[in-house]
Amino acid sequence: MILKILILFFFLTSLCSASPFSIAEKSYNLKLGAGLRVKSNIRKNDTSLFKQNDPSIAPFPFIRFKLSHFELEPDRAKIIFSRSLLWDMDIRVHYRGHEYNTFDMAHRHKTMFGGVALRFLLFKFKLLKDLQNKSDAEIMIVSMIIPAPIGKDTTILLQADIEYWDSDYINYYFGVRDSEAKAGREAYNGKKDKSYRFQSTFITRFSSNWMTRINLAYRKYGDQVANSPTVKRANEIDFLTGIVYEF
């Protein structure tokens, strides 16, 4: 039994060594790129004033600045206290949320979430809190990331997430206040809920500086989101493709 555990430990450690230090995801100072994002829309289109395309198609910039203990992207930043093949820990901020804007409801804004993250081998745990008190929500995310190098130029990252949202998050982004209720859209207060997300990322380097990146993600929402009067479906597909230059 001990031998099996040791074999499994070294196998997982060898997988971890592929990221972030593989040929496709090595340490760097700056990456810039651009791409196209196609994302399905889970919201109902119950107003003619703000038509919400389904799916939405938009350009997507890719920017990442990285030092040994600091990483910065347009919607997140983190300070890393410890990094190794076995584990790492950081504090971070994310600009995120299920933004929703229609003419007869209060605008649900994205907000700044901050907290801590801890990774052990292939598993990562994140605990985030709304720092701007727009929703006063807390989020807990449990992830498993499996890097799979294919040759020396390509890496596939397989990721599975479970996100736990408290009732404040559900009510802010998916609830309907009494003052917003109308015929066909009743008032709604949800309870805590969770969603499941599965993502595959394909990264291929075709020169010393250039690489392509393709992301395909699927999210399954829980009943508290699916039952919201503002939601028309409980699943979401997100596709992103682009080209990146590494300095």
Image (tube, rainbow, N blue to C red):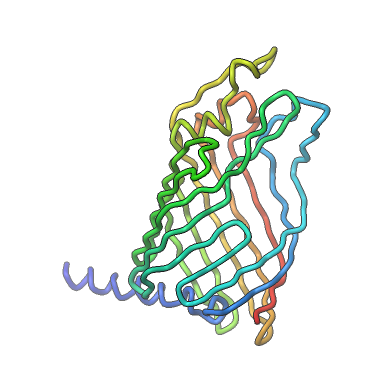
Q: Position of residue 142 (x, y in %)?
A: 41, 52
Q: Going by the picture, which residue comes out furthest to the right?
A: 48
For residue 186, above or below residue 130: above
Q: Where is residue 59 drawn, in percent x and y?
A: 77, 58
- Quadrant of the image occupied by residue 73: bottom right
Quadrant of the rendered structure where residue 101 is? Answer: top right
Residue located farthest toward the front when viewing the structure as drawn: 132
Q: Quadrant of the N terminus?
A: bottom left
Q: Residue at x 80, y 34 (%)?
A: 51
Q: Position of residue 57 (x, y in %)?
A: 77, 50
Is 95 situated above or below 118? above
Instruction: Give whichever of 165, 242 is nearer the camera.
Output: 165
The one of 152 and 111 positioned closer to us in this rendering = 111
Q: Nearer the viewer, residue 234 or 131?
A: 131
Residue shown at the point (26%, 74%) measured from the top left: 7
Residue sitting at the far top: 183
Q: Tell me what residue is drawn at x 55 percent, y 56 percent.
A: 199
